[in-house]
Amino acid sequence: MTRRKRLAVARFWFEGNAFCPEPASLARFQEYEWQKGETVLATMRGTASELGAVARFAEHHPDWQVVVLRCAAALPAGPVPDTLFDHFLHEVIEGLRAGMAEGGWDAVYLSLHGAAITQKRETPELEFARAVRTLLPDVPLGASFDLHGNLPAEWAQILDIASAYRSHPHVDMEETAARVLDGLVRCATTGLRTRCVVLNEGVILPSINMRTAPGGPMYQLEQIARDATVPPVIEVALFGGFPYADTAATGAAVLVISDKDSDPDGACAHRAARQVMAHVHALAAEFRVSLPTPEEAVARALASPLPGLIAVTDSGDNPLSGGSCDTPGLFAALIAARAAVPTLFASFADASAVQAAREAGVGGTITRQLGARHGAQFGHGVTVHAEVERLTDGAFINHGPMHAGLARSCGATALLRLTALPDVRIIVTERVVAADDPAFYALHGIEPAQLRLLCVKAKNHFRAAFAQRCAEILDCDAPGPASQDLSQLPFKHRHIIAQY
């Protein structure tokens, strides 16, 4: 009987914001993704995710045994406790070591982000991959990344195969993982050997203008990266970086993989990386945009002559950049504007407010301060009197296109209607959640098309599902842990401010 090849899979998918007041605790991972074993393939099958790609790989490659080790993922938050990362690292390495005695490994796939931080480590994912490489020096090792990764040059010494998302919003997670898995198969079955080059010159790019839609600078860079992918180069991955991680490696990067047989000294890989990085420098200024204040954005939205839904996004507290759904700037501006059109604010994360709403019951009223539960560094909370209109268990399945099919839970939630401004409703959740999927609104009985104004803590990913649903989307910059005005945040690494 022909021996099946063996693929090990592990995942540490997390983007760290050094200024987020909530650390990435074990509970945050358990709420989002903390799984391993054969059930992972069944759970993730059909989802638009990296693990969805792994499940599809297992179905289409019966000659491979896929062993899923610990897979950990969480919404962006503050640094991961080092004890938690140590536990994760030990568990995966021990799983790999055990597998060496059970038939060995023919390839290892790591699903990573590239901008994780812990309380004491700036590059924990690099440490993770280095440990895997040390244990398995001759086994093909591949990794997928978010395009917001901050990559040090050392990655080039560790990886055989790599790729990063090419879309922002990130609707190509599954495709990215599939490219890495295909590369690993080539390494394991055809003897493909590779050269890897990583260039990171500390260029700081604002993520608010990092969308890959045609016309923007990131679209141009992605096209340049694709044009540079000609044999012997087999992959050019572009990284915009993530400033809020506040690390020495923070900045845009280019990763290039080439076929070692045709590029033995890596000269072609270096040339491609240099070519793309030159364009990063040339286009850096085009990423910088000026955003209106919350007051200006709300006023523009209410005065808009366009029919249909107008959305105002608060990027400074975007949960997918490390926001905690707690800053009051946009909400205060909305209240001050005294909106008299069907309006929804999404959302505050405040477990005590949700509990108060549950105690009051549907039809009851509560008086609460919303916002600033972590302190007033980003503004003072706003006291409201509101009627409880709906209560939910917070469970929904993403419609997509981003993360389509993934089950999500934000804990118990409440839909409130302001007594003084009855056209204004607010969603309050027990846990931090990204309000960027139609299923989140359906959970609360809300059809966005019936709203005139949607004020949402979000940034670019919101557009994946809502660009076609909104007549206009206005981005604003309010104080918060992911504010676009980087001068308002206490960075330790001064090159981030200097380059910005």
Image (spheres, grey):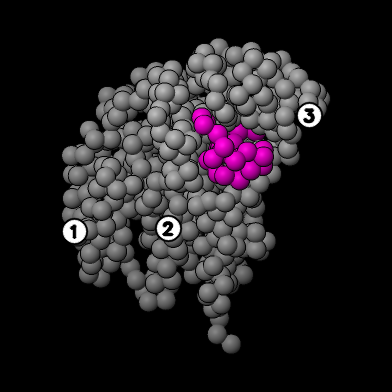
Q: Quadrant of the C terminus?
A: top left
Q: Is residue 461 visible?
A: no
Q: Is residue 371 visible?
A: yes
Q: Position of residue 327 (x, y in %)?
A: 53, 21
| In-image side of 291 versus 89 (left or right) | left
| In-image side of 142 versus 32 (left or right) | left
Query: How far apart are the alpha carbons under marks 2 and 3?
Result: 44 Å
Residue drawn at (40%, 19%) of the image:
296
**Amino acid type, label 1:** Ala
Residue drawn at (40%, 33%) of the image:
306
Marks 1, 3: nearer the viewer? 3
Q: Which mark is residue 267?
A: 1
**Amino acid type, label 3:** Val
| Residue 289: quarter of image | top left
Q: Residues within 10 Å of mark 1 (few under 14, many from 20)?
A: few
Element under disc 1 = helix
Are dots 2 and 3 in contact, CB under 8 Å? Answer: no
Q: Position of residue 103 (x, y in %)?
A: 58, 72
Marks 2, 1: nearer the viewer? 2
Magenta part of the protein: which range?
Answer: 430-454
Element under disc 2 = helix
Marks 2, 3: nearer the viewer? 3
Residue drawn at (64%, 14%) of the image:
420
State which tag comes first along the sequence, 2 or 3.
2
Q: Position of residue 209 (x, y in %)?
A: 33, 36
Does the stretch in magenta take in 439?
yes
Q: Nearer the viewer, residue 218 or 290?
A: 290
Query: How far apart are the alpha carbons under marks 2 and 1?
Result: 25 Å
Q: Which mark is residue 176?
A: 2
State which tag comes first along the sequence, 2 or 1.
2
Which residue position holds label 3? 362
